[in-house]
Amino acid sequence: MAAQRLGTPRELSVRWQLAAIASLILIAGLVGLLIHGWKIHGDPDPGGQILDALRTVEAAVPPAAIDVSEEYGEAHWDSCDGRAGTFGWSEISVILTFGTTLDPSALISYVTGRLEAGGWTMAGQEALSPLGPNQKFSRTLANGTEAVADIGPQMRDGRTVMWSLRATAPPDGPTASGC
């Protein structure tokens, strides 16, 4: 049998260099996908419009509020313990917690006025707790989904009443379910 010629050492060197360059390009592309995210599930909040709409509840925090904390929850891909059929996006949320010297009825009145001015509609009131009322609101967002908000009291450290104003909306796309 005749031996097949693989090429000159120079030709082999060029082939190895091209293979190395192609491998580096492939690795760089994969790293770029990991860094910037591989949007295989779509965008749950195109342009941040849902989160921006929920942030309108910030206007309802009284100006003299104390110990204000803000938490913004962007959608993330989730499931119920990895079970098949439960994968989807988590809800988008804005949670504001604060203290105030306003009595509960004055606070609810203030919050209601500010939220209604921002396009929210009163959706009912839950039974009064010993700490105060829990008022609910709703709003149809530009993408047609229904956002909900509520404000209610909670205890912190067993003696301080704090108020929690929470707004949530479903993502644009499938939602995690089944838990």
Image (cartoon, grey):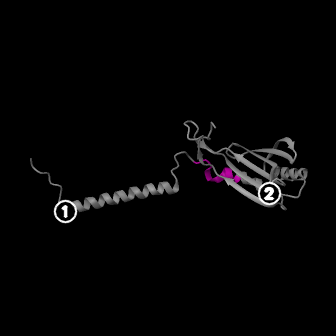
Q: Which mark is residue 174?
A: none
Q: Where in the figure is residue 162, as x and y percent of width and height?
A: 81, 54
| Amino acid under disc 2 | Phe
Q: In the rendered structure, which segment of residues is drawn in magenta?
A: 43-52
Which residue is labeled 1 in the image? Answer: 9
Placement of 104 over or under 128, stated as above or below = below
Q: Looking at this view, name the residue that lies furthest to the bottom.
A: 10
Q: Of 120 and 128, which appears nearest the observer?
A: 128
Residue at image x 56%, y 36%? 85
Residue 51 part of the magenta-drawn span: yes
Q: Looking at this view, name the residue that lies furthest to the left.
A: 1
Side of 55 where 153 appears, left or right:
right
Which residue is labeled 2 in the image? Answer: 98
Q: Where in the figure is residue 32, as x and y percent of width and height?
A: 47, 57
Residue at image x 30%, y 57%? 19
Q: Secondary structure at mark 1?
A: helix
Instruction: Report the mark closest to the observer, 1 or 2.
Output: 2
Q: CA distance from mark 1 to mark 2?
A: 74 Å
Q: Where in the figure is residue 179, as x and y percent of width and height?
A: 64, 38
Q: Where in the figure is residue 18, as x and y percent of width and height?
A: 30, 59
Q: Of 60 and 145, which appears nearest the observer?
A: 60
Q: Looking at this view, name the residue that lies furthest to the front.
A: 158
Looking at the image, tell me whether mark 1 or mark 2 is earlier in sequence order.
1
Q: Residues within 10 Å of mark 2 (few under 14, many from 20)?
A: some
Residue at image x 80%, y 57%? 98
Side of 51 where 81 appears, left or right:
left
Side of 141 where 86 appears, left or right:
left
Q: Residues within 10 Å of mark 1 (few under 14, many from 20)?
A: few
Q: Examine the image and state in which quarter residue 10 appears.
A: bottom left
